[in-house]
Image (cartoon, grey):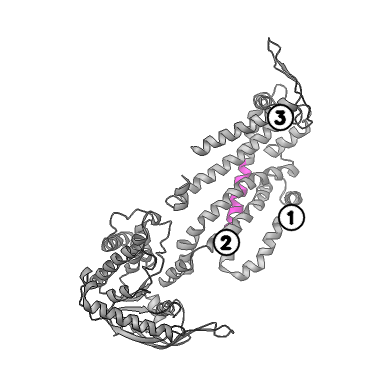
Amino acid sequence: MSVVALSNVNMTFNSSSANKTVALKEINLTIEPGEFISLIGPSGCGKSTLLRLVGDLIKPTAGDILVNGKSAHQARLDQDYGMVFQAPVLFEWRSIIKNVMLPLELRGYSRTDQQKRARELLALVELNGFENHYPWQLSGGMQQRAAIARALAIQPKLLLMDEPFGALDEMTREYMNLELHKIWQETQTTIIFVTHSIPEAVFLSTRIVVMSARPGEILHITNVDLPVPRGEHTREEAAYFETETEVREWLRAAKQK
Amino acid sequence: MRQAISLIVLLLLIALLWEGLKWIGGDPWRAKKNPFGLTHTPPLHFKVTSDLNLPHIWDIAAAFTNPARRNGPPLVGILLNAAIFTFREAIIGFIFGGLLGLILGILFAHSNLLERGCMPYVVASQTVPILAIAPMVIIWLKAGWVSVAVIAAYLTFFPVTINTLRGLRSPDPMALELMHSYAASRWAILWKLRFPAALPYIFTAFKISATASIVGSIIGELPSGIRDGLGGAILNFNQYYISGPSRLWATIIASAVVGIVFYLIITLIEAFSLRGRKALADNV
């Protein structure tokens, strides 16, 4: 069973008013378990909108969205996915461990289970030792890692990530890419990843969905045939550069459209 | 620590300005019981700095220890009892007003209709002078500490309502999306996100309200004929101002101290409640 199935999804904002915006047009996409899908495209092409539709944070104007075979709404109620935003959105009044415990707390886990699970996750994102720090005491990259730990807390089958590393510097971003790749491999989670960065998309993904400028449509899907596990060496392989070039050309086409 | 030092320096500067003005333009002055006959006649004469309008600081200080009435207890004892009495009224008013403000803020934050419908009345309530409301409250509820507390609550609830509403609406849209992604209930969103995010705003309101509740209590005491509080003391020493201006000044200082103490108590609770947060860490 596919993790996400989008069929004929359309999204129009302010559909009744004069300044209506067609954000997404006829999106069809099926994502299989364990895939790492990157959404890439010009600004305002509706990548984030697509992610929010899958997460049931907004409702589509038309079309069907199935997550784990259920409606997106039911999947949200069942906590089938975790979400990571552009900003870490950690609660400043909670220590790091308490932030990671939040989704478990909302699900009614016992206090000891919450703490045990949160500690495991902080170890996974290499934040052990920072349990009792407050968010402002951590660097941007560390905060975003805590946010990833929080998103993984309820062991979702699907992780939705909306430009999670957009605000980080290049060095930290490359390091975070390695970390995320490792987490993806360890947890076997399906990931949908919105990004602006071609190298990031190529390094992480199994498939890259190139979207066109508004109205957002799927222009092309690039398969990334790089062996896993990937590491520093991947960035020097010929196949890596070829894929990068392919995506870059499709993106150029996307902008001209 | 730095705050304490700057406070003391500021108090010294005010004292210096006070006595300096009296030195230049006050009444002629001679030290009591001094063998050298030390006297000072200011070169100018301003009406505002006369001993009646602006008593010497040492006279005000002495007023605290001198009996307010012949053979009575020292003024400081009377003022202390009055301050405790007024403080009690103010705290009760503060708690009621604070709770009302919190409840209104939470209701308004969840219903635009309610906010639009009720907010004009909440604002209007604060444009009516408290001096006009106070006698009516006393007629309705009978003269006593209950009516005084109600008047204090009347001044307290408004800043709490406004700031609670604002604070509850302060979370980032992404934080709300995060809570929605967890399928969190309204109740969970209120207690785990909105309320903690609103706390710094609420404490700002509490600080304003703490001092306002003292003022409300003092004003409430005046028409209710309560003589045990600071309001009563102010009224009393006002009537005998000509014979002892320093006693009224001493009462004013006592009232200010009560307000400051209440403010400091709120600040301490705030520091405890918001421990760990960045904004506070910056202040220390």
**B38 magenta-colored:** no
Q: Residues within 10 Å of mark 2 (few under 14, many from 20)?
A: many
Front residue of this view, candidates A172 and A129: A172
Say if labels 3 and 2 share a chain.
yes
Residue contact at pointers 3 and 2, CB within 8 angstroms: no
Q: Which mark is residue B128?
A: 1
Spatial CA span between label 3 and label 2: 47 Å
Amino acid under disc 3:
Leu
Image quadrant in which the C terminus of chain A is located:
bottom left
- Residue B76 appears in the figure: yes
Q: Position of residue A234 (x, y in %)?
A: 22, 73
Spatial CA span between label 1 and label 2: 22 Å
Magenta-drawn segment: B87-105
Q: Is residue A69 left or right of residue B215?
A: left
Q: Which mark is residue B165?
A: 2
Q: Position of residue A190 (x, y in %)?
A: 30, 77
> Mark 3 falls on what kind of element?
helix
- The residue at the point 54 percent across, 42 percent down is B264
Amino acid under disc 1:
Val
